[in-house]
Each structure stands twice: as C-alpha cells, then as structure tokens.
Amino acid sequence: MKKRVLITGGAGFLGSHLCDRFLKEGYSVLCMDNLLTGSKENIEHLVGNEDFQFLHNNVSEFVHVPGDLHYILHFASPASPIDYLKMPIQTLKVGSLGTLHLLGLAKEKKATILVASTSEIYGDPLVHPQTEDYWGNVNPVGPRGVYDEAKRFLEAITMAYHTFHGLDTKIVRIFNTYGPRMRLNDGRALPAFIGQALRGEDITVFGDGSQTRSFCYVDDLVDGIYRLLLSNYNQPVNIGNPDEITILQFAEEVVKLTGSKSKIIFNDLPVDDPKQRKPDISRAKEILGWSPQFSRSQGLIPTLEYFQNKVQSGG
C-alpha cells in the first residue's frame, strides 16, 4: 500500500509543487484547498493521476478525511501582504482554527504533521542573519500582525501537541521563495518586478530599496521540506537561500534579465516592512544535510519563462 499524504493549500504555489514531489516519490496525494488564493490551474496536470485526489474544503471550518493517513503538510494560508491585508480574519483563522483541526486529525490518524511557518515570525529582525533561536521583533497589532501572529500561534500550538500528546510534528520556517506558479499579482517583489518589466511599466521599489531579501528557488525549498518531514527533528528549521540582495539591486537585476526599458521608481515603505531578511541555515545543513542547489540566476530562467507565458496570455 502506498503511503497517503494530505497537503492543505495544495493548489497554491508551494502546495502544488509539494503535490508534484510526493507523487514523484510514490505517495498517494490528497490535495485540499478552498481556492481562496490557490488555483486549479496549478494542479490541472495532475488530474487523471490515480494517486492524486483534489478536495475543495476550508480547513478553518472542518477537516474530515476517511481512511488511513500517514502524513499531513499544512500549507493553507494567504501568504503575501496583498492577500492577508485583504483577508485578515481568514488569515488568522487558518493559522489558528485550521491548524487546530489538522493537529486533531493527525492525532486521530497517528500521522506525522509538518506545518508551514515563515520567516515573518522574526518580524523586523534585530538579529542578522536570523537563527531559529531568535524570538523575533513583531508588532502584534500592526497591519502585518495578522499573518505574523497567526504563524507564531501555529508554531505554539504545534509544539503543545508535540509535548502534551506526543504527536510527531515538524515546523518549517520558510524564507522568500520563488518559481513557476507564483501569481503575477500577489504583491511580492519578485513577481511584481518581473510583471512590470515584461509589460514595460515602471518598476516600483518601496523605500530607498536598501532593505534586503534572500530568494530561494522552489525546488530547493520543496527538497528541504521533504527532508524535514522524514527526519526525527521536531524543533523549527529555517529553509531558505542565504544569498542576500537589496531590493534595489534585485530590481536592477530584473531589468537586465528581461531586457526591459522600464524605469525604477520609488514609493513609500509599507508599515513594519522588514529591513533585513537572511536565514541562518546551519541547522538545516547539520540535521537534514540540506543546502540550496540553485543560484538565483539559475532559478530565474524557468521563473521568467513562466511569467512571460502568463503576461502573453493576459493571466
């Protein structure tokens, strides 16, 4: 019998790539999504695969899965500022109620559960690079607090189920990730810059562009998540690419890569926007034997190709 895995948020950017990986590894995959920010387009190539099943469901309301279940990966959540500022209550619910429902399901099925946390739990960090031992600098009542605190709660309740119920839990702290199937309009720097460049529009940089980000290609991230799920480690683990770049440098890189004549313009910095973002991945290297294999220049080639098709099709 094939092992069965439930992936929530499975029609999203990361979730759909996880569906691909687990099918490739020989699992039976149950993809659950309410399509609030996910899209059936991301999983249409899997329809017809006898080991793949899609369930339209909101995990914040209830979760019912008949039969055996060996693994759960909880990736359901709005994940970009433009989404969680528009859907603050849904974001808080999926991080709290949704996580609670899935932990209960994992307990019932005696399944291992991996929850998707984020580098945003570090807030606007006072420690650089960010290690898993850093507790963060988060404004709980600021506009970004709905996402940051939802994920901090997700971590807290996951550890409570691990320590109190003995549940096998994993926590991945995901840093900026990119690749095919990102939404052009999700508001994050990489799709925004590439979309603007391909359409010949001005590229909008917030602040003076000196804030930094570290971009990890999606295949690398998925590999780190897969290794973490199958490990014996239960504390949080950063997965990301420590190759740090300023937002202005990245905008210039996108202009050069696309051959665009777009000008770079500057707008006001959003409230509580992190000034620095760079993972310390020592723990992932030591425990998982993981480190990113794709350079930014390598990962941007298939990403750009995907966005070119999207822009041409008006998507």
Image: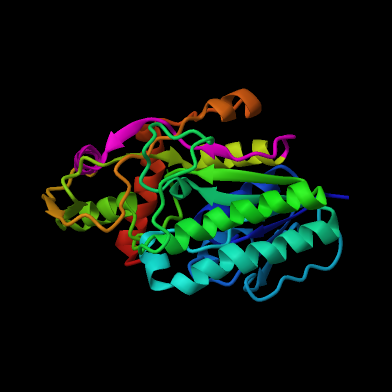
Residue 251 painted magenta: yes
Q: How is the image coloured?
A: rainbow
Of the pair 182 and 205, the residue shown nearer to us: 205
Of the pair 67 and 2, the residue shown nearer to us: 67
Residue 143, horizontal then vertical, whole percent: 35, 64
At a point 58% along the width and 28% down the height, the residue shown is 283
Relative to 285, does residue 239 appear above or below in the rendering? below
- Residue 47 visible? The answer is no
At a point 68% along the width and 47% down the height, the residue shown is 22
Residue 294 painted magenta: no
Residue 61, horizontal then vertical, whole percent: 65, 76
| Residue range (magenta) | 230-257
Q: Quadrant of the rendered structure where residue 277 is?
A: top left
Residue 88, horizontal then vertical, whole percent: 44, 70
Residue 207, horizontal then vertical, whole percent: 18, 50
At a point 68% along the width and 64% down the height, the residue shown is 100
The reply, left or right, for residue 208 in relation to residue 181 is left
At a point 30% along the width and 60% down the height, the residue shown is 311
- Residue 5 visible? The answer is yes
